[in-house]
Amino acid sequence: MHKEGQVMRQAVYNIYMYRIDYIQVFALIKLFQFLLIVPMTAIVFKLMLRVTGYTHITEQNIQSFMVHPFVISMFILLIVLVFLFIYYEMGFLFLMAYYQQRGIRYRYLHIWQQLNRKVLSFFSIQIIFLFIYIALLLPLALFIFPLTLTQAMTIPHFLTDEIMSSRSGRLLYAAMVIVLVIVGIRSILALPIFTIQPKISLFRSLILSWRFSKRDLLKLLGLVAMLVTVLLLVMLGITLISTWPLYMLERLIPSTALVTAGITIAFLEMIFVVLFSILQAMISQVMVAFTYYTPLNKTRFIPKFRRRRYKPLLFIVLFVFIALSVMNIISLEKSVYAPDTKIIAHRGYTEGNVENTISGLVSAASAGADLIEVDIQQTVDGQFVVFHDRTLRRLTGKNGVISNMTLGELKTLTIHANGFNDKISSLDDFIEIARALNVSLLIELKVHGKETEDVLPKLVEKLKAYKVLDTYYVQSSDPQMMSQLKKLAPNLRVGIVYALNIGPMDETVDFISLQEAWVTDQLISEMKQQKIKLFVWTLNKDQSLHNFIRKNVNGVITDLPDMALKIRKKQNEREYFLQRILNLLQFMF
């Protein structure tokens, strides 16, 4: 423990003594990110859309989009630029830590030139090793930083749900993650070795990192885990202390709550940025210290700071704080009223029932769901059966393809899930029960390619016969079929299901159902302007439900309608601003 204590004291000492350097470097990094990386990425993507002629990217056109020569070249360019940004950002911090720990004077220009001399190696086979290195560290980052920093890099839930639905899938997924984490841990020191040693290759750095003592690697990971834990505890403490004034003012002087809430969020946002920057600096110090251990020596070179340097910094901080406060006040003011997001039960209520069954429909209606989503497909005799999969394997354990069987044959089968049993039903059965329960359906038409030519007219006639054409919703992942359906039944609410979307949408249907990973604030705003409803699927986490209900999307599709209804009930005009802030920040902990 003596070495670990020395390393931690050295890291804290260096960051404090070189605090102005770190403030300047992190400010430059954020400025570069904000002014160059983000706008350039948006411009390049718009250029790719214009050259290829697409309005937006979905699972239907992504294959043809990705094989376009211009798109391939632009993606290669973006990947290289992102890798270079990571290299320069982390390389700068590693070299600063190395020089500070040895008491060597340095200048930013000198560090920049040292990094430049090695960057040429990336325009060779070395770029492959950099790609491998970053790819290996992603699973490790997901464990170390279970925060917004890495949430965007997680695999979409609809994919993991399919993988985790079987024992073999769960074992394969667990084995893959374990292998990647172990290899990532053994490779963690490759970048500091590469940036600090002037003549070493990245491949050689990976080998040296792999050979590094396992015992020291465990100590290093223990220190990193401790740093992250301390950071989270500090964030939690600061949040509790800083929200106390808001808690009191909301109850004593309600008229001041909006402004106080905006200021509180601005303060927390700035504090969190500072804390994450300190964490990044601490981790770079610790990694360099473990790689090139130098005992703490306070007699070495100490930088001199002038008091006047703080004045422009204080002015900038004050300006950013005021700007963030104003933006937060405007944002909070827009979300004062209760959301009217529809709660849509995914395949009925599957908690205690089998999916797409009458019992699940009844349970969802009893829970209070606004809509109940069911999957239908056409049988060999042209009827509509309520069933999701193309085959019977998952729910019956038997072989059989839905499109090759009659409705009568299917209705005799028993389906199983999570220890519960039920029968397969027809769409007519569902509509009759739904009408009796006074609840509307969101019908998803599963297209298997063997539908009859009159499949859409048949569906429209059925909905007309039950007098639900004006109250039901119909969606499918086939855009052409939904466009035809909208022409056949203009009064029917018709939508398209997308598992992926990048870019602005321009659709002629009534609503879009989109997987949550691809729903952005910009898309929500665009959909509202176009008066196209937006349903988000499939939300089964408290955080996701809070987030999208707060944003007041038109509908959330969930396996947990009771939880979603409780969250929507809480987010009304009587909810305190403090609770709104906690809803925004709870995912940090």
Image: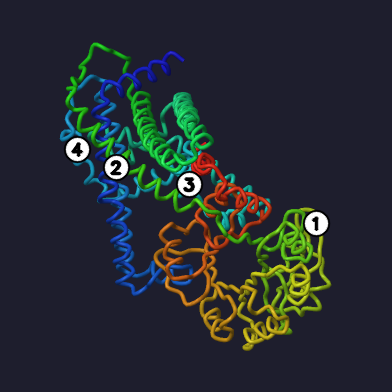
* Label 4 to label 2: alpha-carbon separation: 17 Å
Q: Nearer the viewer, mark 3 or mark 2?
A: 2
Q: Which residue is mark 1?
A: 420
Sequence-first tag of 4 and 2 = 2
The label on residue 555 is none
Sequence-first tag of 2 and 1 = 2
Q: Which residue is mark 3?
A: 151
Locate residue 186, reporting x and y percent. 44, 35
The label on residue 30 is 2
- The quadrant where residue 174 appears: top right
Locate residue 71, reporting x and y percent. 33, 66
Disc 2 element: helix
**Is the residue marked by circle 3 packed among few (<14), some (14-19), or many (20+) residues within 10 Å?**
few
Q: Nearer the viewer, mark 1 or mark 4?
A: 1
- The residue sitting at 51% across, 32% down in the picture is 248
**Residue in the foreground of this view, choosing between 150 and 576:** 576
Sequence-first tag of 3 and 1 = 3
Q: Is residue 182 above or below residue 492?
A: above
Q: Is residue 83 above or below residue 220?
A: below
Badges 3 and 2: C-beta atoms under 8 Å apart?
no
In the image, 320: left or right of 493?
A: left
Q: Which residue is mark 4?
A: 112
Sequence-first tag of 3 and 2 = 2
In the image, 325: left or right of 118?
A: right
Amino acid of disc 3: Gln
* Label 4 to label 3: alpha-carbon separation: 31 Å
- The residue sitting at 32% across, 33% down in the picture is 192
Q: Nearer the viewer, mark 2 or mark 1?
A: 2
Locate residue 551, reporting x and y percent. 50, 55
- The residue sitting at 81% across, 73% down in the picture is 411
**Residue in the foreground of this view, choosing between 214 and 418:** 418
Amino acid of disc 2: Lys
